[in-house]
Structure formats: structure tokens, C-alpha cells
Amino acid sequence: MSATASDTRGAESVAGRVQSEIDRAIQRNVKGLSYLASPAPTVGSSPKDVIYKRGTLNLYHYHPMSDEVYRVPVLIVMATSNRGYILDLAPGQSFVEFLLKSGYDVYLIDWTPPSPEEKSLRFEDYTLDFIPECIRRVRKDSGVKELTLLGYCMGGVLSVIYAALHPKTPPKNLVCFTTPINFASMELFAKWSDKRYFDVDRLVDTLGNVPGELIFTGFEMLRPASRIAGQLQLWENMWNEDHVKSFRMFERWSTDTLPLAGEYFRQTTKELIWENNLCKGELVLGGRRADLANITSPILHVVAEHDHIVPYAAAKPLIERVGSKEKEEVMLKGGHISLVAGANAQRRLWPKLDAWLSVRSV
């Protein structure tokens, strides 16, 4: 055989292998594209009952998944701008499922878009009415007077305010995830809502409830390139069905941003961001001062090392200011969302919470 013929066959062999790899890559990406075009993945599938519903408020009780259940139930307060299914994405990827299988009795306060009639909802409604009523119903449903109150982000703010306003009836335990206290340290939010340029009264008086699109855009502007980076990563992993499924679940949740009641948004802007009254101990609701020193429950505050929404400086004062004798702050690797959901949360936050909470739930 001549050298020329050998070279030709070798080149054809290499070309054939390259074409095979190209064909496989196309097939993988076509499969990924097909999945991407399929109906949205199911989220929030852990079995539950709605035991109380009132306008924007929904109180869920999840079905037990363990033969033995801790005595003290857990009431989760979700952030007011986001849906609670981030904590119950899918079987095997659900914080709620983890708690249930670990033996906890789980309740969750979830929110739906406030109606036009609910534009007048204020912090007083959430902390002096909604949360106390849900606590009363959890106590009645569970038959146990004590409970753990667990809040995520602004749900943590509402939980902290509730505890500060009710020192005579404190929760047995208070757990907060990425909860801002010093709003002056949320620098980008503070700049965008600078009172010299941001007419919050005109916004609320004109629109009533603040649209979810506006809230979503505010979060997006914190990291404007993150969505593009996520899309590029999606394309690079289009062949990986697990990656595509995970991307779609998180994308669905992040864009499913809720409108906020107008008066609640006005208070958040003026009382928390402009005046920083919660941090200063000067927030007064219903004639009561929300003094963090009033909080005496054992408290765990978990913060994320790379949180771009609630930077550490904004979260740090919580443990410093509460009057609790048992108090612990834990910083874990992750961001604002990956702290509570996804593989990072499964390795770090979930087992840490279980270790802290289990001995305080008997």
C-alpha cells in the first residue's frame, strides 16, 4: 500500500470519528432543546393541605414522611416577594421534604399576589395579624403550644419583627436565613431608592400594588450579567437533562416574582431603607416598638458568604442586637438562593439546621 493511500484512509478515519462526535453532540443538544421546549417541570409537589387562606396569605401543613415526629412543629415564613416552592422544588431537591423525612412537623406561610383591595396592607397586618393568626392555627392543628419560627430573607424580617413585638409569647426557637437588619448596608438598593430621586409616594399612589416586574428588575440589576452567564452555561450543558431541569426550575422561580402591597412597599422604603428604623430600634408598629433586645428565644441565623442581595454587613447586626442567651450565627458558602436550595444547600445548610434544631424540638 502506498503512503498516499494510507494517509488518505487515516484522514478518512479521523474525519469519520469527528463526524460521529458532531452527530452525537447534535443529538444531545436536540434532546436538550426538546426538553427545554417541553412543559415546565412540576414544583412544590410535597403533599400538603391548606389549613388557612386569607387573601394573599396561604398556610400549608405538609403531610408527615417519618414514623416518628418531633414534638415542636416548624412554621416557615416565606419572603413576601417570592413563592414558597423554592423550598420544595422537586423530590430529592426539596428542603421541605428533607425536614419531613428528618421527622419535623412542617407548616409554611406562602404568599400569592395581593389583590387591588389589599394594597393597604402594612407591616402591622403581617406582624400583628397574619403571623399571630397562623401561629394560633398551627398550635391548634398540632396540639402543641410551642413552635419554631423560621424565616427566609424578608420572611426573616417579618419573623424578627413579630418576635420583637411579642416578648411575652415568644417562639420556642427562632431561625433566620439571610435576614437583613441594617438596610443602610444594602448599598445598591439604598442608591436606587435614594429619597432625593425616588418618589415612592407617587409610585404607590399611582399603581396601588407594586408590580412584580419592577421587583424582579431590581433584583436583576444587582448582577446584570448573571442571566446572560446562566444562558451560556445552559447552552454548554444542553445535553445534560439534569442541568436543564434544574435551570428551568430555578428560572421559573426567579421570574415568578410577586407584586408587593403598596403600603407595605412604602413602609419598606421609608421605615427600613431610608430611616433604617429596625436596626436603630425605632420601628414602631401598632404603638409597640420592635426592639431586637426583646427577643429571648434561642436563635440561629445562617448567612451566605457570597450573598449579593443581603450582604453580610446588612445581616450581621441581628445576632449582636437580640437579647437571647442562646444565639449562633453561621456563615456558609453559597449565594442568597443556593444557600437554601440546590446541591450546595443539601451539603451545608440542611444538615447544619437539623443538628441545631433537632435537640431543640423535643
Image: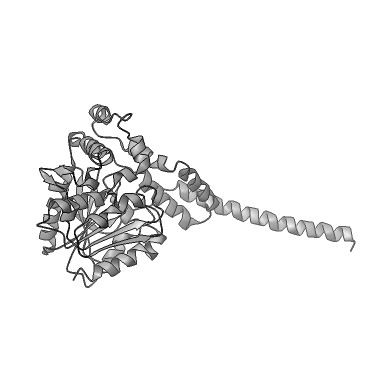
Quarter holding the C terminus? bottom left
Question: At 33% across and 60% down in the image, what residue appears?
Answer: 94
Left or right of residue 110: residue 30: right
Q: Is residue 237 visible?
A: yes
Q: Of residues 61 and 23, which is closer to you in this image?
A: 61
Q: How many marks?
A: 0
* Colouring style: one colour
> How far from the left and from the top, in percent, is residue 255?
37, 43
Residue 115 found in image quarter: top left
Q: Of residues 145 and 271, which is closer to you in this image?
A: 271
**Residue found at the very far right of the displayed protein:** 2
Question: At 31% across and 29% down in the image, what residue appears?
Answer: 196
Q: Is residue 216 visible?
A: no
> How far from the left and from the top, in percent, is residue 206?
25, 26
Q: Against 159, is 186 above or below?
A: above
Q: Against 170, is 211 above or below?
A: above
Residue 191 found in image quarter: top left
> How far from the left and from the top, in percent, is residue 165?
14, 50
Left or right of residue 35: residue 144: left
> How far from the left and from the top, in percent, is residue 350?
33, 64
Quarter holding the N terminus? bottom right
